[in-house]
Image (tube, rainbow, N blue to C red):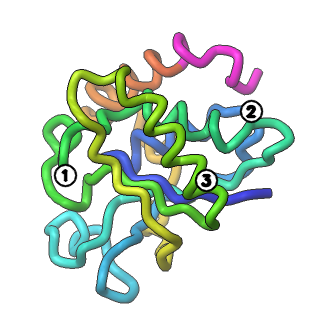
Amino acid sequence: MNDVVLGGGCFWCLDAVYRELIGVSSVVCGYAGGTVEFPTYEAVCGGRTGHAEVIKVTFDPDLISFEQVLRVFFAIHDPTTLNRQGHDIGTQYRSVIFCQNEIQHQLARQLMHELTDSWPKPLVTEVAGAETFYPAESEHQNYLALHPLQGYCQLVISPKLAHFRRQFTPLLRT
């Protein structure tokens, strides 16, 4: 099993998508890349810790490659907006890949170079080394499944998930 930590806006959106992928055995919402030990959701959302909202994805490389994990990542958020995804604004919503080793770092850079012409603006995704990962509070784990009727889930997460399902059908669990 391999891990990667990804930040692409609100972690609830990423969480919902990666839970549906073949080969993904675990998705944990959390925080990484900041200066405060054991940050809270309120502190991170307030922009006081330097952390990004992230997910830690554990995957089986025999079932889904690191490249496929990243292709999904780049398809489900806008990697050209600095510190912003939709209405979520701040460094906590930055586009970032916290690579767990040098191979991941090289593959991430290579894929970003390959995808450059796919976007109308330059990619601003940060590719960084491993940082301490702090799991988010339990109420933030598997948020869509626990709150499907909540407004943010219906207006933001569910449409993003539907788009993902159409685009990545071969990678979905059955």
Residue lying at 45% horizontally and 46% vertically, measured from the top left: 143
Can you give x and y, in whole percent of width and height, for residue 39 in the image? 33, 80
Name the residue nearer the viewer: 167 or 158.
167
* Residue contact at pointers 2 and 3, CB within 8 angstroms: no
Q: Label 2 sits on what residue type? A: Ile
Considering only order in the chain, which callout, 3 or 1, is on the residue closer to the N terminus? 3
Helix, strand or loop at mark 3: strand
Name the residue nearer the viewer: 117 or 156.
117
Considering only order in the chain, which callout, 3 or 2, is on the residue closer to the N terminus? 2
What distance separates the C-alpha of mark 1 from that of mark 3? 21 Å
User: Pointer 1: what residue?
Assistant: 83
Q: Which residues fall within the magenta stretch?
A: 165-174
Can you give x and y, in whole percent of width and height, for residue 167 in the image? 53, 14
> Which numbered circle lies on residue 57?
3
Observer-side mark, 1 or 3, equals 1
Is residue 12 positioned above or below 173 on the image? below
Name the residue nearer the viewer: 135 or 140.
135
Residue lying at 64% horizontally and 14% vertically, measured from the top left: 169
Q: Image quadrant for the N terminus?
A: bottom right
Name the residue nearer the viewer: 31 or 148.
31
Instruction: Assess whether residue 167 is covered by the magenta stretch.
Output: yes
